Image: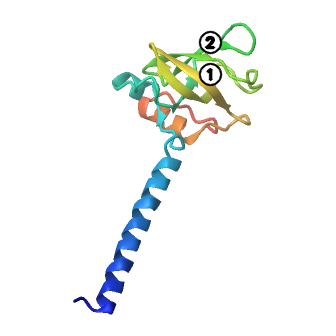
Amino acid sequence: MKSLKKQRRIQVLIAAAVALVVAVVLIGYGFRDGINLYRSPSQLAESAPGPEEYFQLGGLVKEGSIANADGVAFDFVITDGATEVPVRYVGRDPRPDLFKEGQGTIAKGYYRGGRFEAEDLLAKHDETYMPKEVVDTLKATGVYKDPNS
């Protein structure tokens, strides 16, 4: 017969293992929609995600690509200098005031049927700001121009 001390030790180990499994499941459940991966147009061209994968697409808004549609919807093209991706924005809000051609932006949404369907847009908030991910992508393709020089 097992001693009471040994039984208690086994019970504590089992309880700790169950608590660890529950914690891992809860963390995984919480992150199921919370992790938004960033991709550049070149990365998107290399390996397109599934139509239900929510992610961020960043780059420059191509000159002459903004075309208004009905309501708050509009189309534009995001480029990193090497690859271009057509984007359709159909969000709740009108186009941000600082969203312009030739400026850096990050769009959040889904890639379906060869076009990115954006639900949310992040635009610069002053004359010199550009998201770090976009700057890194543009530097890698040789398109980035330092605004301070």
Residue 134: x %, y % from top left: 53, 34
Seen in the image, is 39 located left or right of residue 120? left
Relative to 149, residue 99 above or below:
above
Determine the residue positioned at 51% across, 31% down.
Answer: 54
Q: Nearer the viewer, mark 1 or mark 2?
A: 2
| Residue 20 locus on image (x, y percent) | 41, 65
Residue kind at label 1, given as amino acid type: Gly
Quarter of the picture containing the N terminus is bottom left
- Pointer 2: what residue? 75
* Quarter of the image where one finds residue 97: top right
Give the amino acid at mark 2. Answer: Asp
- Please name the residue that numbered disc 1 is placed on: 102
User: Crowding at label 1, few (<14), some or many (≥20) Cα neighbours within 10 Å?
Assistant: some
Q: Secondary structure at mark 2?
A: strand
In the picture provided, is 44 more to the left or to the right than 103?
A: left
Whether tag 1 and tag 2 are in contact, CB under 8 A, the answer is no
* Nearer to the camera, 51 or 21: 21
Q: Is residue 38 above or below residue 71?
A: below
| Residue at x 48%, y 21% (from the top left corner) | 111
- Secondary structure of the residue carrying numbered label 1: loop
Residue at 36% over, 85% down? 8
- Depicted 1 relative to depicted 19: above or below: below
Mark 1 vs mark 2: which is more N-terminal?
2
Q: Position of residue 149 (x, y in %)?
A: 61, 37
